[in-house]
Image (spheres, rainbow, N blue to C red):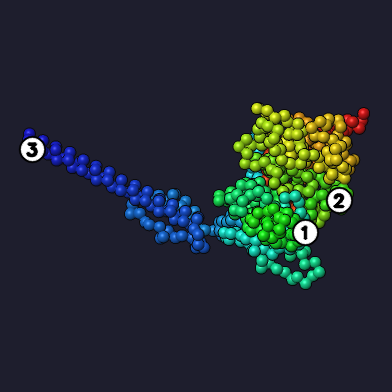
């Protein structure tokens, strides 16, 4: 009996031992198989995404062999089939690298791809998704380089002085400043011509402020005249070097602002003797240091341009109005009100010809900026200064009554002032000059009609912009977009149904065609801020104005 029990225990122990050995053998074979698959997958991805020139088909000997007796011929065949670099695969990868690596060269193609996406109803079905196409257009336009700085001056210099500039003749003088032609020293050209101060050689202008009040140090000058520095790209007066206004094609290109000692510049004793310090003129009242603003030199002011040809041509006048509104819209978005819009403060670059003038807004001495209340200002007392041109002061500002809870609202004041300038663009007299109309008391029915050379939509738009109630005026974005559409939109878009996909098709096509055009700055201003809702609203406004004109004609 004892012998049988021992035999039974030995048989049971040998059985369990053989089972465990068999199990370990199978586990080892499976581990070897998994390791084999991982090696093959690693070789596959190395061949697909290798950075060097690919070689021939990877042979089976390059893969580690499994010691298992259980082969997987199907999986091995599939892996061996894909672990290769065919000529077609190489061409596909090379074209993909060129396409995505050189995105700048294929930007028009990418823009036109947006048209295909916008046309596919299964991909784009809601207005929110359609608006994302406009966001891509804005991002595309924002990725292109901005206007380059003038001259050979580099921003690496920590300080700029007046002695770094050659000063030319006087270009103009106002109540608070004088402007000279200038250039950086070392940027001299051949001065043998009779006109040695031509714009090609003297490509800069220096605005010299008259300092009667501020002490002769940079901090005091900055505190007194910081509004003049709003559009500057580099501010050397403030310790923070803060940029108040980002660059824009319709804002003056001001390179740098700095303070320095006042010196005797050309014709200084004849033009502004009282602004000179006593060390330079015995009857002068100015201080020893003042503010100098270096900016791009422009050809003329809008007033001089209109004086030469009485009135701008129809499309040129519309282009100038569009650029004024784009510049004011840029100021408004950054919480700045100019408050002194007039033809003397609008400069023109005629390098592309008088038929394509480029307009910028200048002279920010009266602007409202860095206000804690935004574009509104408390008006407690009549002694508070309401800066700007009194003749072109918006009615909500000029007729405001001071009080404990009174507020001056400048959110649409510049829009109203820009509307008054449209009369001058089309050759008529400004109705608010020389006492013809007073912004405090005029009635909307007293406004004279615009000349017939103005399009009917522009006449309606100007009438709406000159409404006394600012809440009844169109927004700056709507007014600027209406002018952009009148300039650039095709007839099928203006006259056809206001369909979002048609609008996006036109926007994407315009983005693709205007990227490389040198004279496309007006369209760039629209595309860099484009919103589908605003464009559709502008189209409905134009269509309503057109239908109203047609109805009046039938009556």
Position above or below: 504 against 307: above
Closer to the camera in the image, 76 or 354: 354
The label on residue 3 is: 3
Closer to the camera in the image, 42 or 193: 193
Circle 3 SS class: helix
Residue at screen point 85% across, 40% down: 434
Residue at screen point 61% across, 51% down: 215
Residue 553: name its quadrant.
top right
Within 10 Å of the Cα at label 2, are there few (<14), some (14-19), or many (20+) other Cα atoms?
A: few
Disc on the earlier residue, 1 or 3 = 3
- Image quadrant in which the C terminus is located: top right
262 left or right, relative to 550: left
Circle 2 SS class: helix
Q: Residue furthest left?
A: 2
Q: Which residue is mark 1?
A: 270
Task: Indicate the position of residue 500 as horizontal and vertical percent values.
Answer: 71, 37
Q: CA distance from mark 1 to mark 2?
A: 27 Å
Residue 55 visible in this rendered orientation of the protein: yes
384 left or right, relative to 69: right
Circle 1 SS class: helix
């Amino acid at each position: 009996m004892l012998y049988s029990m021992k035999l039974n225990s030995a048989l049971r122990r040998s059985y369990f031992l053989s089972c465990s050995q068999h199990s370990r053998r199978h586990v080892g074979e499976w581990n070897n198989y998994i390791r084999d698959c991982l090696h093959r997958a690693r070789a596959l991805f190395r061949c697909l995404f290798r950075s060097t020139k690919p070689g021939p088909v990877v042979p089976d000997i390059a893969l580690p062999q499994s010691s298992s007796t259980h082969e997987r011929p199907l999986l091995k065949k599939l892996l061996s089939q894909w672990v290769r670099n065919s000529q077609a695969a190489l061409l596909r990868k090379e074209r993909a690298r060129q396409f995505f690596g050189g995105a700048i060269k294929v930007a028009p193609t990418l823009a036109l791809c947006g048209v295909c996406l916008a046309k596919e109803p299964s991909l784009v079905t809601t207005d929110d998704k359609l608006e994302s196409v406009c966001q891509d257009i804005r991002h595309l336009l924002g990725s292109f380089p901005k206007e380059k700085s003038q001259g050979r001056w580099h921003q690496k210099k920590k300080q700029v002085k007046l002695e770094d500039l050659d000063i030319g003749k006087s270009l103009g003088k106002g109540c608070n400043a004088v402007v000279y032609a200038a250039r950086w020293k070392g940027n001299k050209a051949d001065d043998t011509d009779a006109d040695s101060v031509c714009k090609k050689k003297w490509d800069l202008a220096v605005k010299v402020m008259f300092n009667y009040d501020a002490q002769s140090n940079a901090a005091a000058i900055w505190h007194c005249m910081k509004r003049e520095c709003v559009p500057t790209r580099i501010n050397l007066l403030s310790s923070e070097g803060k940029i108040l206004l980002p660059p824009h094609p319709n804002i003056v290109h001001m390179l740098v602002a700095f303070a320095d000692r006042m010196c005797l510049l050309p014709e200084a004793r004849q033009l502004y003797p009282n602004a000179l310090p006593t060390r330079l003129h015995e009857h002068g009242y100015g201080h020893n240091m003042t503010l100098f603003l270096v900016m791009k030199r422009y050809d003329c002011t809008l007033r001089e341009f209109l004086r030469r040809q009485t009135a701008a041509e129809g499309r040129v006048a519309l282009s100038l109005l569009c650029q004024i509104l784009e510049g004011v819209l840029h100021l408004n978005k950054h919480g700045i009100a100019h408050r002194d819009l007039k033809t003397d403060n609008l400069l023109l670059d005629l390098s592309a010809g008088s038929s394509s003038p480029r307009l910028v807004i200048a002279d920010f001495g009266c602007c409202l900026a860095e206000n804690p209340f935004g574009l509104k200002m408390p008006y407690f007392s009549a002694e508070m200064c309401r800066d700007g041109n009194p003749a072109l002061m918006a009615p909500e500002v000029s007729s405001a009554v001071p009080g404990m809870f009174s507020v001056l609202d400048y959110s649409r004041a510049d829009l109203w002032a820009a509307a008054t300038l449209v009369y001058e663009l089309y050759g008529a007299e400004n109705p608010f000059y020389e006492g013809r109309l007073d912004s405090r008391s005029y009635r909307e029915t007293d406004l004279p009609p615009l000349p017939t050379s103005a399009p009917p939509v522009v006449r309606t738009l100007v009438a709406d912009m000159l409404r006394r109630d600012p809440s009844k005026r169109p927004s700056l974005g709507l007014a600027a977009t209406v002018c952009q559409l009148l300039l650039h939109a095709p007839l099928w878009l203006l006259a056809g149904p206001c369909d979002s996909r048609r609008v996006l098709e036109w926007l994407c096509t315009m983005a693709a065609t205007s990227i490389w055009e040198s004279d496309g700055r007006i369209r760039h201003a629209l595309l860099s801020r484009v919103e589908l809702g605003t464009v559709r609203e502008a189209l409905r406004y134009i269509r309503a104005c057109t239908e109203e004109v047609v109805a009046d004609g039938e009556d």
